[in-house]
Image: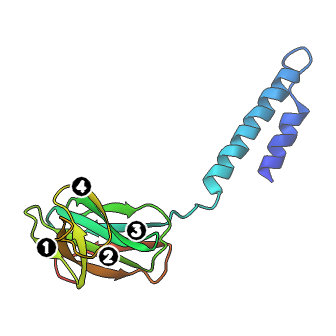
Amino acid sequence: MQLLGLWREADSGRQDDADGIGDRTDARAALVALLALLSLLFAPNLARAEFTVCNQTLDVVNLAVGQEVDAAFQTDGWWTIGANQCVNVIRDELANRYIYIYATDVFGNAILSGSTDMCVERKRFTVRGIDECWQRGHIAARFYEVDTLEQARWTFFLTGSSP
């Protein structure tokens, strides 16, 4: 209702200049800008679909992620996550119920592992396929399976104790 009152006030114009047109135009432009700003502030937030990992340990960790991409498993790494930090490791809409993660300390020792064998590399990597890692020149690692319950967003909290 207050915005309607502002519009009427802007429309009635002030007769500061010869014909009052400049003030009405300025007031309308200001009101339109205000309405645009308010629509941005109060518009519903668009939820970003993503998979986030939060490191709740006191150590820096290196993280690799596995998921099914185009009917084949793919692993990607490495993300370095500082103590008490979070990183979005998948920024696209989660298309898979299960995401696989593998975490090491700064010395390369596994601090989170599971029962699913997938491939990693020592440096930044993307590896298609999870079979015969050693034969293809990769390193085999045991990834931990995270059930996202088919949610669009998921946050995994890496703690000092195994899940």
Residue placed under numbered mark 1 in the picture: 110
Q: CA distance from mark 3 to mark 1?
A: 21 Å
* Label placed on residue 85: none
**Residue type indicated by callout 3:** Phe
From the viewer's perspective, is residue 152 above or below residue 19? Answer: below
Residue placed under numbered mark 3 in the picture: 51
Secondary element type, mark 4? loop
**Residue type indicated by callout 4:** Arg
Whichever of callouts 4 and 3 sits on the residue coming sooner in the sequence is 3
Whichever of callouts 4 and 2 sits on the residue coming sooner in the sequence is 2
- Measured from the top left, where is residue 152 in percent x and y? 50, 73
Mark in the foreground, 1 or 4:
4
Q: CA distance from mark 3 to mark 2?
A: 11 Å
From the viewer's perspective, is residue 29 above or below residue 53? Answer: above
Q: Residue furthest top?
A: 18
Residue placed under numbered mark 4 in the picture: 124
**Whether residue 81 can be seen here:** yes
Horizontal relation, residue 45 to residue 24: left or right: left
